[in-house]
Structure formats: C-alpha cells, structure tokens
Amino acid sequence: MREQPFASIRVNYQEIRNRSKLPCVQLSRSFAHKQIVRTLWYACGVTLFSVSSTAQSVAPTIDEVRQAIKPITEPVVGFSYYVSMVWHYISVYTSLAILLSAFLASLFAYLSMRNQRNITRLRETFATINDDNWDKDVILAREVFSKIKQEIGSETHKITKYCDPPSDPSITNEVVTLHTILNDYENLALGVRHNIVDEEFLYRWMRGALLEDWAALSPLVSAYRGRRKNSSVYIEFEGLAASWVESRSYRTGKKLKRARKLIRIN
C-alpha cells in the first residue's frame, strides 16, 4: 500500500516561535536546522504534489519528495542559518559592525584601485603600440630589419655578421638598427615581467611577429653573449619568446588564450 503523501510531516510552529524569541546564541543549531528543513520540505512537497496531481493520477510518496528536494534545500538552509547568525551578532555587537564596515570599505577601495590600475595599464599599452605604428624611426628600423631577413633567408646564422662592433664599417647602420630592435624587445619583456604593460593585449597583438623576430635574431643574441662572455644578454627577450611559444604568460606562467573569431561573417 502506498504511503499517503506528506502524512508524516509534522512541524511544531509554536516551538519555533518560542525559540526564536531567545537570543540567537542560545538557539540550538540542530533544532533550527531540522525545523527549517522540514518546513521547506513541506512547502516544496505541497508544490510538487499540486503540480503532479494534475499530470498523473498517482501522487508521489514522502520519501520520493524528500529525495528530490534534499539536494536543493540542504545548502539553502545552511547558508540561511549562517547568514542569520552573522546578522544577529552584527546587530548585537556594534564594534563588530564597525569592523565589518571598515573591512568592506577597504575591500571595495582595493578592488576599485586594482580595476583602475588594469584600465591604466591597458591604455598605456595601447598608446605605446599606437605610437610605434606611427613613429618614423621605428618604421625605418623595421624596414631595414625586413631587408636583412630577406637577405639571409633560411641561413639565419649569417645575421651574426651584424654583431656589435661591426667588422665592416659599411654595415654600421644595420648593426645599430638590429641592436635597437633587440633593446626594444628586451625593454618590452621587462615591462611584461613587472606588470607595467598588459601581457594579454601584447600577446594577441604581436605574438606571431615576436616569435618570428626571435627566430631570426637568436643567432645574433648568441654572438653577443659569446663576444661579451655574458649569458644574460637579452635574457628577458628570450624568456618572453619561450613562454609565448607555449602560449603561457611570462609573468605568471598561466595559459594564455589566443584570439578567437566570435562572430561569423558570411
């Protein structure tokens, strides 16, 4: 014989009202928790019963209702209980309320400052890239570098002849140009490491160009290190390129997301 739905639910509302008049610190957690859970079960059960009675002739049992709504009611009741406890303590102890207000104000100020720093970093990064796109010296240096890459082709080791100081005075301009480009990349990598410029913005803007330039300039960097006997020459540029090859942040080591087409254009 099927169990009558909700027949075993009994909620002592008078006892709940009597206990609710006591201070919250004296309220038994187990009693309050059970009574609230039962009340919520009853309310949800009545709703489910009214809905199911119109859809089918046989009503669900109380055990079926409990199993269906328990995963929902347990977290809600627990969260509500702790919120009510915290609210009670705040209303009773004014010093705690003052401390909590100060903490929330400090947290809000910190989040606002961090958001403002992020916006400023993005603006500075955009301004730096935009200025370089229109700077005549930068444009000329990139043209010289492009001609050198076409000249050496796949034999990248030939770029070592442009190591500073040059053995041939006729290539002094090319040597200075390549030295300047390496210095710019080193400075950019330091800005990424110290969170001065936005790495994700740069990653999406120039990942391909940076890796291509590093592949062409790495033999020249090795020549600089050998001539100066210093293995740290342009180490930041190398580190940035090594991180971006694996699509990871140079500053944090976390995975960086590549740009994706979000809108399909027919």
Image: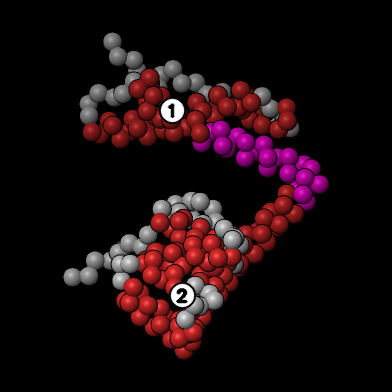
- Residue at 68% across, 42% down: 87
Characterize the magenta stretch by its predominant secondary structure. helix
Q: Residue furthest left?
A: 266
- Of the pair 141 and 124, the residue shown nearer to us: 141
Give the mark toward the camera: 2 or 1: 2
x, y (%) of residue 44?
Answer: 41, 33
Q: Which mark is residue 162?
A: 2
Q: CA distance from mark 2 to mark 1?
A: 74 Å
Residue at the image position 37 percent from the left and 77 percent from the top: 148
| Element type where label 1 sits in the image | helix
Residue type at tag 1:
Lys
* In the displayed structure image, the side of residue 205 where residue 87 appears, left or right: right
The range drawn in magenta is 76-99
x, y (%) of residue 1? 28, 10
Q: Residues within 10 Å of mark 1 (few under 14, many from 20)?
A: few
Q: Amino acid at mark 2?
A: Tyr
Q: Position of residue 203 (x, y in %)?
A: 44, 64
Residues packed near mark 2 inside 10 Å, few (<14), some (14 to 19) or many (20 plus): many
What label does residue 113 carry, if any? none
The reply to whether discs 2 and 1 touch (Cβ–Cβ < 8 Å) is no
Q: Position of residue 137 (x, y in %)?
A: 48, 87
Residue for point 72% across, 52% down: 103
Q: Earlier in the sequence, mark 2 or mark 1?
A: 1
**Relative depth, front residue between 163 and 238:** 163
SS at mark 2?
Answer: helix
Residue 184 visible, this angle: no
Asked if residue 61 shows in the view, the reply is yes
Residue 70 tag number = 1
Figure quadrant of residue 105: bottom right
Task: Please report the residue visible at 68 percent of the width from the left and 40 percent of the height from the top.
Answer: 86
4 vs 174, left or right, is left
